[in-house]
Every structure is written in C-alpha cells, then in structure tokens.
Image: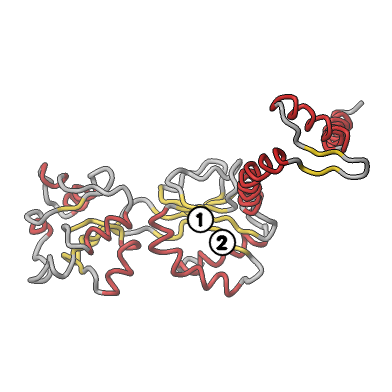
Amino acid sequence: MSVVTSRQQQRQAGRDRTKGACAPGAVSQQIRALEVHFGVRLLDRGNREVRLSTDGLRLYANITPAFEQIDAAVQLFDGRRPGPETLVISTVPSFAACWLTSRLGRFVATYPGIEVRVETSVQLADLGRGAADVAVRHGLGNYPGLDSVRLFSPHLIAVGSPDLLIDGPVSSPADCLPYPLLQDRDRTDWSVWLEAHGVKASPSAAKGPSYADDALLVQGAIAGQGLAIVRDVYAAGALAAGRIILAIDAPVRTPAGYFVVTRPNRVSVPKIAAFRQWIMQEAGVA
C-alpha cells in the first residue's frame, strides 16, 4: 500500500466518523447524555414529532449566541485565506503608510482582476511558509534563497515644522544641535548624519523622544516636537504639503536600500510578475 493511498483512506475514515457523529442516532444519544447530566428533559418526544421542552428552549436560547460567535469567527478567518487571484504584499508599516498606499491605486486600476492585500511587519517576511507572495524590505539586499531587486536607496534628511524653524533653515548641520532632537529606534541616525558632514556627535545628539517607526517620527516633527533625521521616502508627502521643511538641504545617502523580494520559482507567476514590474516602474528602475 502506498503512502498516498494510506493517507486517502485515513481522510475518508475521518469523513466517515464525522458523518457518523452527525447521524440522527448519534445526535439522539448525545442529547440523552445531556439530559442525564443536567437531570432535566430537553426534548418532548411524541409519537410523530419531537419538540424542545421548556428547559430545552432555555438552554437553546443561552447557547445560540455562543455558536453564532464561533461561526462568525470561523467565517472571518476563512475569508482571510488568500485565493488564487489574491496578491499578498508584505512590507514594513512606514513604507506602506508613506510610499506604497498612495501609489497602489494605480496598480489596482491597471490590474482589476488581482485582489490586493497588504500586510505589515517589521520582521523579514518568511516567503517560504507565510501567506505573502511578495515582500518589500529595507536592507542591504542579502536575502539568501530569494530573488531581490533594488528599488531605490533613500537619503537621510533633517526636517522640522515651519513653526519650530520660524527663522527658516539653519546655516550648517551643527546648528541643528541646539534644537530638541527626535530620535529613531536605535538613536543612531543623528550621529550618522552629523558625522557624514564632519560634525563630531556629542552625547546630546542621542537624547530626545525615540520613535520605533519612521512614519511616527515624521508625525513628531510635524507636531513641532523637535528636528528629526528621517529617510526622504517617508518625508516626501509631508514636505510637499508644507507640514515640515528641510532644516538644511544636506542629504546623506544610506548604504541600505528598498528591495522587492520573492521566491525564485514564483517570479513568473502572473500576479507577482505584474506587481514586480509595476513597483519597479514606480521606483524608476524599470
């Protein structure tokens, strides 16, 4: 007997057991067991019909909402299962909020038959076991076993609110230090930016409120909490709207970049190929 045949027989046996458990005789036995357990009659049994007793109606009324909640929860998760035409895109929250979302409508308009689902995570997408078809990640491009294409490399820029920079941009990078400084998760971006301009970073350059997400860091700058070093890709929208301005026009290119990543054996899948080509065009590399 082959392993496949054995597994098929096991599945069929499971289905048979399920059918048996739902047969009228099995249901009747379960109800009688409940009646013995509770010490009440749940059904009024006549010659030709069976009805819920008063106690049975009371039990039914109390347990029905619970079963409806279970059914709703199961349907919710069943609806989340990707279909063959669903493209699941995994990316970091800040990239989704500040770059991808504002452009994604163009992809949907071009490919109306592809249903898009965006999921956010700060972890490296597990494209081997997870639901994601394609990921966009920030890094050095070292993704063993995966196919990756660099989209662009961001620049670190210094920004602040117009109210904070009431007198306009500062004259030199060192002139940012007297202002309140907003920090990234690791409190390193100010030091990297300052040292790139030949300014020795003091301990004060690592002080100030810290934000784990660059999109939140931009919001802190918009609120006037201080100057921030952010990646230009995240600040572009707020800069264009005038909600923040450059503290000084002195960008610093970062060694890391944004990559579109997928499994090599799925590069040619139509929905994935379409997204890769589209996002490369949006990034100006196609």
Q: Give the x, y percent position of residue 238.
A: 29, 69
Of residues 232 and 52, the one nearer the viewer is 52
Q: Are marks 1 and 2 in contact (CB under 8 Å)?
A: yes
Which quadrant is home to the N terminus?
top right
Residue 39, compared with residue 222, is above or below; it is above
Report the residue at 41% width, 58% height from top. Answer: 95
* Depth order, front residue of 220/275: 220
Amino acid under label 2?
Answer: Arg
Q: Position of residue 63 (x, y in %)?
A: 64, 41
Residue topped by disc 1: 260
Residue 119 horizontal side relative to residue 57, left or right: left
| Colour pattern of the rendering | secondary structure
21 sits to left or right of 58? right
Q: What residue type is labelled 1?
A: Val
C-alpha gap between disc 1 and disc 2:
7 Å
The residue to which callout 2 is attached is 276
| Residue 94 in sight in this render | yes
